[in-house]
Amino acid sequence: MRILGIETSCDDTAAAVVENGRHLISSLRSSSAAIQQKFGGVVPEVAAREHVLSILPTVRDALHAAGMDWQDVDGVAVTRGPGLIGALLVGVTFAKSVGSALNRPVVGVHHLEAHLYANALIAPIQFPALALIVSGGHTTLAYWTDHGQLAVLGETLDDAAGEAFDKGARILGLPYPGGPAIERLADQARPDRSITLPVARLGADSLNFSFSGVKTRLRQLAADVPDRAPELAFALQEAVAEALTRNIERAYEKYPVAHLYLAGGVSANRRVREKLGDWASRRQVTLHVPPVELCTDNGAMVAALGYYRLTKGERLGREEGPQTPWPL
Ligand code: KG4
Ligand code: ZN
């Protein structure tokens, strides 16, 4: 069963073909990041307009790269939410049109859950597991017992982990998206233990996250030591990685599972992968992380999750559109 996956929740127009929820056949992405850079972040109206221009060529090219015709598509999966409403509308409307024209089933999936399914393209998901989704809009820690069974244990109370990178980059005068730019700058840092950023201490039992204090302190330090940008970028990366690792340890004390699944744009970060990898080997937990190109938004993760949903008989109803906000 070959599923066409479509993703338009933020600034990437992405399409992919995945066979039986496991085998990636083709995946393409057209990002409006270069245009958004002029504004220092994603402007919803600009994102929506760019999706309108890119969606047809992106899907057509993904099918072409898979050596397929429209008729070869067995089902369509699309991100239904959460995300920017105008951006989601483009993907959902397009998916419904394709489904209707080809007489194929269409399913709408949750963007955060889809991120986790980038891991399903590497090996079948093993339950029970802890799941950590770290993206530009969300930081969500969950206990994952089966397909479709995710219990949220913790979320961010303010900025998301990716937002901490994006806002931190802005403070340091780096371009959007901030994560890759911070990572590159941090690589140039000189060892300096005197420059650190605080990891928020929430209640002893809390599995929530908070990154606004990091941002505030970074802003102060950037004014105090403007010539130490690489060390500040390093400290920011370290603080985010530490906050994530600390909550994973706390969650593990309550849910001592054998598997940890990481997903979302921030999981592309080498230091985050390394720190959680060290934690996992200490605890003899298997850490699953998607390949870097499948960490950020893509159509393959949507198609992979869509496969499980479509084979269970789930369908996007004629009257159903984007859903945002949409709790996990
Ligand atoms: O999952 P994603 O592509 O989109 C959302 O669903 O939000 O995540 C985008 C976020 C951005 O905040 C971006 O700065 C961050 O992921 N990101 C990174 C890296 N690559 C992307 N953060 C840290 N290090 C990276 N290498
Ligand atoms: Zn995402």
Image (cartoon, rainbow, N blue to C red):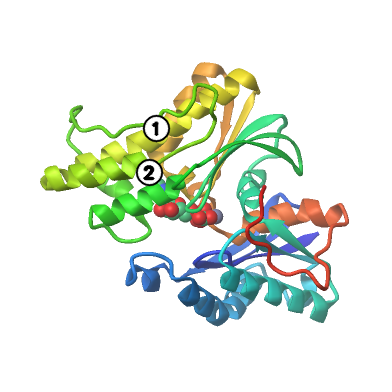
Give the answer, above or below, for where 108 lies relative to 64: above
Which quarter holds ligand 2?
bottom right
Q: Residue at x 70, y 76 (%)?
A: 93
Give the answer, above or below, for where 269 lies relative to 305: above
Helix, strand or loop under label 1: loop
Q: Residue at x 34, y 70 (%)?
A: 39
In primary-sequence order, the first of circles 1 and 2 is 1
**Label disc, if present, on residue 200 of the rendered structure:** 1
Disc tally is: 2
Q: Which of 38 and 290 is in front in this view?
A: 38
Location of residue 249 in the rendering, given as x and y in whole percent from the top left corner: 52, 23
**Label disc, if present, on residue 212 of the rendered structure:** 2
Mark 2 and mark 1 in contact (Cβ < 8 Å)? yes
Location of residue 24 in the rendering, given as x and y in whole percent from the top left corner: 65, 55
Label 2 crowd (10 A; few <14 / some 14-19 / many >=20): many
Label 1 crowd (10 A; few <14 / some 14-19 / many >=20): some
Q: Which amino acid does label 1 sit on?
A: Ala
| Residue furthest right in the image | 313
Q: Quadrant of residue 232?
A: top left
Does the beta carbon of the residue at mark 2 sit less than 8 Å from ligand 1?
no
Q: Residue at x 64, y 60 (%)?
A: 81
Q: Which residue is drawn at 53% across and 64% down?
A: 10
Location of residue 23 in the rendering, given as x and y in whole percent from the top left corner: 69, 52
